[in-house]
Amino acid sequence: MNKIDVCVSPALYSLHHNPESVVVVVDILRATSAICAAFMNGVKHIIPIGTIDEARACKEKGYMVAAERDGLVLDFADFGNSPFNFTPERVAGRDIVYSTTNGTQAIQMASGAHHVVVGAYFNISALARWIVAQKRDVVILCAGWKNRFSLEDTLYAGALAHQLIGSGAFETICDATNAALDLWQVAHHDLQNYVLKAAQKARLAKHGLDDVIDYCHTPDLSNIIPLLDGERLVPVEA
Amino acid sequence: MNKIDVCVSPALYSLHHNPESVVVVVDILRATSAICAAFMNGVKHIIPIGTIDEARACKEKGYMVAAERDGLVLDFADFGNSPFNFTPERVAGRDIVYSTTNGTQAIQMASGAHHVVVGAYFNISALARWIVAQKRDVVILCAGWKNRFSLEDTLYAGALAHQLIGSGAFETICDATNAALDLWQVAHHDLQNYVLKAAQKARLAKHGLDDVIDYCHTPDLSNIIPLLDGERLVPVEA
């Protein structure tokens, strides 16, 4: 049996790091949902970038750049962090540099793992199948918000752990995983309503950006797993 | 309305620190349960100490010392971390130096808050009354295990938050608090069985120390709040 760990904040990742594991990075509202949407819509590669300075330098080199902080598009960027921005017209066949408040840093942080992939509801069942096929322990890394615990990311961790345990190939002795599984049991009957109490809903609403919440909780729109390959995310079908 | 924050790991405390707040330190299995048991049994003061070297130095100065790491009593200590050790015969009227794997460090970490108090099921309702009377925001700091998320500490945070919100004087916009409240709703009907899946149960069982789990989840045996006063914990009646 392989093991599931849930890491509820990037600040705790060193406690969960395992160079032999698959790490799933999760930032449901909105970075990893946007990345999965971009691949659904035909993006070729996404290059996750941590700092604003690096993102600006990429723009100056001619890349298309998606970059936001605290929900607001940076002035030099082509567009921001909403999954709705990554339309086929804009992204199909292109490479995009992407930098966000929480999610892209978490991807870079996990780069010492055996595989790093990006999770969202959009690809959850495909992702579970792909992880089972790897036959490795998995760490679900919740990007959270500025290192704080995030309800919507932890819930997703519970949803994914539920599928993994359901496969019969995984078990857990991790308290955060057990908590996430129980939260998923509480929330899954009425997920869209449940997540309205998440602090991120209020943060997004302040800028009129909470229109994505329902969409970002829609399962199984895609079979594409964004996989970190060197410094870029590439699409893998599952 | 005052606010409730739950901090699920000492490694995240800097995100929750508020010099005007009351901090409740929680390490149900077993440090804060043992501290509350000691005050129930008449201890005069408890001096929380972080490092093993400091604890040894206190022993050499003639203090009674309770000290453990990973559930095992340190060789120079008088006894370890089980609430059963703090009997009236041993502790009544005495000062005790106390050092544990997780809990005592968390108490020291929080010492910049307006008040630092120690929470356990033993004093939960008295503690809720006392906190309401302070008319301040509260941070519930889960000591966890070596900075990992702990199921039993987070559940207690949910139980205490439930009482505080029930008083009508508190609200929360904190995701970890909302998660803890929902976990408490899942677990409270059958708490003693629920906590058997906590990782700390397995750690304690390895050393035959899991006999305290039921006792440590017994509510309202005491009206004493251990309050940090300088470098020592003193009893306050509530």
Image (cartoon, coloured by chain):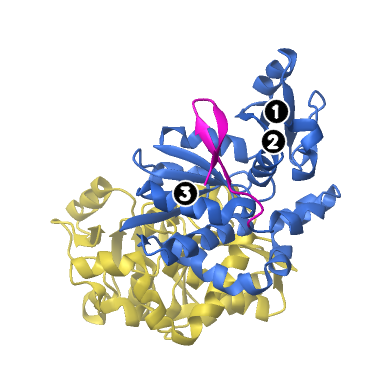
Chain colours: A yellow, B blue
What is the quadrant of the N terminus of chain A in the image? bottom right
Element carrying mark 2? loop
Mark 3 or mark 2, earlier in chain: 2
Label 1 sits on residue:
B93
Q: Are marks 1 and 2 in contact (CB under 8 Å)?
A: yes
Please say if A10 is above or below B104. below
- Mark carried by residue B130: 3
10 Å crowding of disc 1: few (<14), some (14-19), many (20+): some
Based on the displayed image, in which of its 4 quarters is residue B235 positioned?
A: top right
Mark 1 or mark 2, earlier in chain: 2
Locate residue A49, reporting x and y percent. 33, 53
In magenta, the rendered stretch is B220-238
Based on the displayed image, in which of its 4 quarters is residue B82 positioned?
A: top right
The three-letter code of the residue at mark 2 reads: Gly
Whether residue A18 is visible, yes or no, is no
Label 2 sits on residue:
B42
Q: Residue at x 79, y 31 (%)?
A: B90
Specify whether A66 is left or right of A139: left
Mark 1 or mark 3, earlier in chain: 1
Name of the residue lying farthest toward the top: B61
Please give the chain letter of the residue carrying mark 1: B
Specify whether residue A218 is painted magenta.
Answer: no
Q: Are labels 1 and 2 on one chain?
A: yes
